[in-house]
Amino acid sequence: MEKTWASGAIELLKHADDHISKGEAFDQRIAFISIDNSVETAIRTFINIPFSLSGVKFSFKEKEDAGNSFPRMLNLVIDKASDKVSNIELSDVEFYHRLRNQLYHDGTGLSVDKNHLEAYRTIAELLLRNLFQIEISYSTSDNSLSTLILSWEEINKLIRQLLEANDIDFSATFKWEEAFKRGVLTKHQFSLYQKLSVIRNEQVHATSGEIESNRIKYGIEIASELRKLLEPDTKKIIYSYFLEHPTQAFSARGIGYIFQISKKYAIDILESLENDEKINSGTEEDTGLKLFQVKHSNT
C-alpha cells in the first residue's frame, strides 16, 4: 500500500515523538493529543481509501453513518476489518481517547502519565502497522507498559496462528476446549495466556496511581515463558511456510512481519531452523541483508 495514503497519520505520530523526546509536561500533553489525532486520522483514512488498497469494502451508507464520529469510525473498522485490528482492543482506544478529551478540554493543569503516553503511542504504532504495513517504532524501556502491550500482541497472534494452523476457528465459542482435546494447546499454556491477558488489560486501563511496575514486569515474564513454550509449534508453522515458498528467500524482518512477531524472536526461530538444517542462509551482495531459504534436497 502506498505510504502516502497514511502520510497524515504518520506526520502526526512523528510530531508526537518530537514532543515526547523533550520530556516536559506541556510536551507530554501535546504528544498525547497528537497521538490521538494520528489514531483518528489513520482510521478515517483507512475507511476512505479505495478497496483495491485496503481490501475492505465500506459502503457509502456506512461511511455516511460513521461521519466524523471517532467511536463510530472505530466500531466500523473493527466490524469490517476485524482481522486487521484483532489485537487492538476497542476499549483501549476509547479509554485513551477519553483521556485525550480531558487533556484537551479541561485546561493545562492535567499531566500525562508516561506509561499512558507510551502505551497509546504503541497502539498507534500497531494500528499503522496493521492497516497500512508501515513501521514507526519508538524505543521504550524493557519493562514498560508498551513492552507489555507488544508482548501481548505477539503472544495472541502466535496462539491464533497455532489454532488456525490446526483448523480451529479462533472466533469459535469452544475453541479452547477443542484445542485441549486435540493437544494443540496445554492447560498450562492457556492458564499463562489468561494471566497475561488479565495483567495487560488491568494495566492498560489503570489510572496513573494504579499502574504497577511489578505487575507489568510479571506480565512480560509470562509472555517470555509462553514464547518459549510455543516455540516448537511456531517453528513448524514457519517451516511449513518456507516449504510452501521454496524459491523465495526471506529476511528476519520479513518473517517477523508475515507472522507478526518481533524481529528478535524471528531471528531465534530462523537460527534454530538453520541449526536443524531445514533452512539455509546467505547474504545478499547488494544490500548485505541476511536472507533465509528452505534447504533443498540433493536427491
Image: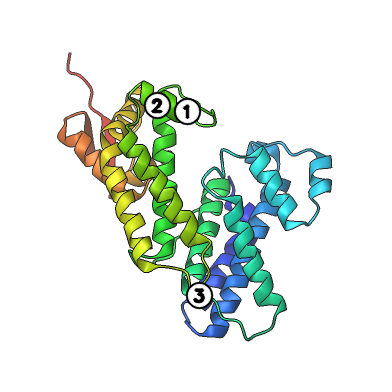
Residue to which mark 2 is pinned = 179
Indicate the amino acid at tag 3: Asp
Q: Are marks 2 and 3 in contact (CB under 8 Å)?
A: no
Question: Percent position (x, y) of residue 273?
Answer: 22, 34
Instruction: Decide which of tag 1 and tag 3 comes sooner along the chain.
Output: 3
Instruction: Decide which of tag 2 and tag 3 comes sooner along the chain.
Output: 3
Residue 240 — which label? none
Nearer-the-camera pick, 11 or 105: 105
In the displayed structure, 58 sits above or below 262; it is: above
Residue to which mark 1 is pinned = 175
Name which quarter of the figure residue 280 lies in.
top left
Question: Percent position (x, y) of residue 163?
Answer: 42, 29
Q: How many marks?
A: 3
What is the CA distance from the residue labelled 2 to the residue labelled 3? 39 Å
Q: Are marks 1 and 2 in contact (CB under 8 Å)?
A: yes
Q: Of discs 2 and 3, which sits in the foreground? A: 2
| Left or right relative to 42: residue 230 | left
Indicate the amino acid at tag 1: Lys
Assign the N terminus to one quadrant of the image: top right
| Left or right relative to 38: residue 244 | left
Residue to which mark 3 is pinned = 113
How packed mark 1 is, by other alpha carbons closer than 10 Å (few <14, some 14-19, many 20 or more), is: some
